[in-house]
Image (cartoon, rainbow, N blue to C red):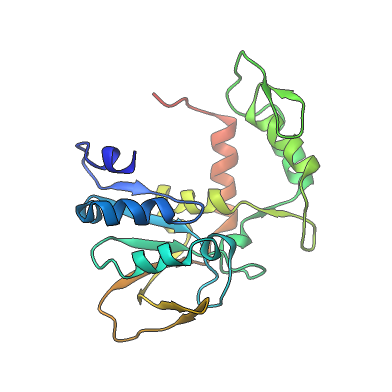
Amino acid sequence: MILAQSRKKRAQKLVLVPIGKLTNIALALKKEPALANRVRVVWLGSNYPDPGEYNQENDEGALQFILDSTSVPFEMAVVRYGKPSGTDHVRVSKDEIHARMPGKGPRIRALVTGRNGGRFQTFGDYSVDLFDHIQLNGTPPSRALYDMAAVAIVKNPAWAHPRKVPAPQLVASKWVERPENARTITVWEDFDRDSILADFYATMDRPVLAR
């Protein structure tokens, strides 16, 4: 699917936004190295420059392969658990979801069964149910919208700050800087939580179906 989509004619490069491990993209690049010239990869992952993070740890080999793939544009929307500079900062509370989301989004005819049971016709109502069943953390208790923050900077790069760095290396699950490395990647940090959420709520208030 990645290779087929990348071969279609388009005005700009195909933007890949993996919100999990990088296995499929690394395999596609290995199978067809020319893919690197047709895509831009914006990955949600890592606590760089600190170690750890779920998406990174589940396939460190794939991440290192892409870090060493000299021609593919690679950008990291960092997570940074518990810090204000990563996607972990884009948080909402259950009270906020209850206040802003009921009934929001397009209404479908067929009811869809939710993860925790219940049947829903709008994403807004389903999101309320998800927050009623999800584990919250922090003070006040809240949940980070990691995936949405990563997609948001593709829509509007002004909602975070990009920083070019020489591509580092993962050694025993820890980052090792390579300041002389000619291969650079982009690290996205300092996400504008308020602007990202304001756009999200505005979109849910006035949804436009994709064609």
Q: Quadrant of the C terminus?
A: top left
User: Where is residue 166, by image quadrant?
Assistant: bottom left
Left or right: where does residue 58 sit relative to residue 153? right
Q: Residue furthest bottom?
A: 180
Q: Nearer the viewer, residue 133 or 128?
A: 133
Left or right: where does residue 101 sit relative to residue 48? right
| Count of marks overlaid on the render | 0
The percent position of residue 4, horizontal first and vertical second, equals 27, 38
Q: Residue at x 56, y 42 (%)?
A: 200
- Is the residue 150 above or below the residue 183 in the image? above
Q: Residue furthest top?
A: 109
Q: Residue at x 67, y 69 (%)?
A: 82
- Is the residue 30 above or below the residue 46 in the image? above
- Is the residue 18 above or below the residue 51 in the image? above
Q: Quadrant of the N terminus?
A: top left
Q: Residue at x 54, y 29 (%)?
A: 206
Q: Nearer the viewer, residue 36 or 27?
A: 27
Can residue 99 be seen from the camera position used here? no
The percent position of residue 192, horizontal first and vertical second, equals 54, 59
Q: Residue at x 43, y 55 (%)?
A: 23
The percent position of residue 182, horizontal first and vertical second, equals 25, 78
Can residue 209 be seen from the camera position used here? yes
Left or right: where does residue 74 sit relative to residue 47? left
Left or right: where does residue 86 sit relative to residue 166? right
